[in-house]
Amino acid sequence: MSGVKNSLGNLVTKLTIYPISFISSIVVARVLGPEQRGVFNYLIIVISFLIPIFSLGFGSGIIYNVSSKKYLPKDIFYSVIFIAFLIGIIVCFLLIYLKSINFLGSVG
């Protein structure tokens, strides 16, 4: 029975998030205008492309280990924070390097 309850909770969450996302995209388009909206979309696409590459499946591994009850969330909290910080630093240095060789163009 808990599977049905969890599925319904997930459905309610998705039905809540989609309208908020839709409304926020309309607000962003109105505020930025057509030209700046293109720059914004470019940045969103780059970020959406890079996140799965740089996360290295880390989030999925955490979800698997916590859901299989191998570890409690409080037991892996500091490891998660440390590794996320480390990945963030690596990504920042990589983006700074790509900016320095002018790989990202004028938007970067």
Image (tube, helix red, strand yellow):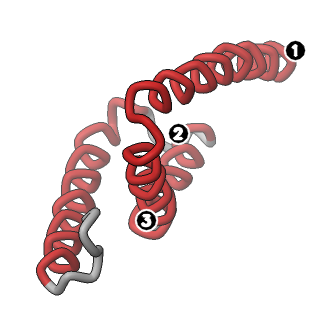
User: For numbered disc 2, what is the local secondary structure?
Assistant: helix
Q: Is residue 59 above or below residue 78?
A: below
Q: How many marks?
A: 3
Counting other residues with Cα less than 10 Å from the Cα at mark 1, is it few (<14), some (14-19), or many (20 or more)? few
For badge 2, the amino acid type reads Val
For badge 1, the amino acid type reads Met
Q: Gap in Å between the C-alphas at discs 2 and 3?
A: 25 Å
Direction from residue 91 to residue 9 in the image, left or right: right
Q: Which residue is mark 3?
A: 50
Q: Which residue is mark 2?
A: 66
Name which residue lies at 43% across and 62% down.
46
Name which residue lies at 60% across and 38% down.
67
Pinpoint residue 23: horizontal percent, then vertical percent. Answer: 58, 19
Direction from residue 18 to residue 95 in the image, left or right: left
Foreground pick, 24 / 5:
24
Foreground pick, 9 / 65:
9
Which part of the image, by quadrant, shows the C terminus?
Answer: bottom left
Direction from residue 53 to residue 86 in the image, left or right: left
Foreground pick, 58 / 52:
52
For badge 3, the amino acid type reads Leu
Counting other residues with Cα less than 10 Å from the Cα at mark 3, is it few (<14), some (14-19), or many (20 or more)? few
Which part of the image, by quadrant, shows the N terminus?
Answer: top right
**Among the two numbered marks 2 and 1 on one chain, the one whose residue lies closer to the N terminus:** 1
Name which residue lies at 41% across and 32% down.
73
Q: Which mark is residue 1?
A: 1
**Among the two numbered marks 1 and 3 on one chain, the one whose residue lies closer to the N terminus:** 1
Task: State which quadrant residue 36 falls in.
Answer: top left
Name which residue lies at 78% across and 20% down.
11
Q: Gap in Å between the C-alphas at discs 2 and 1?
A: 20 Å
**Among the two numbered marks 2 and 3 on one chain, the one whose residue lies closer to the N terminus:** 3
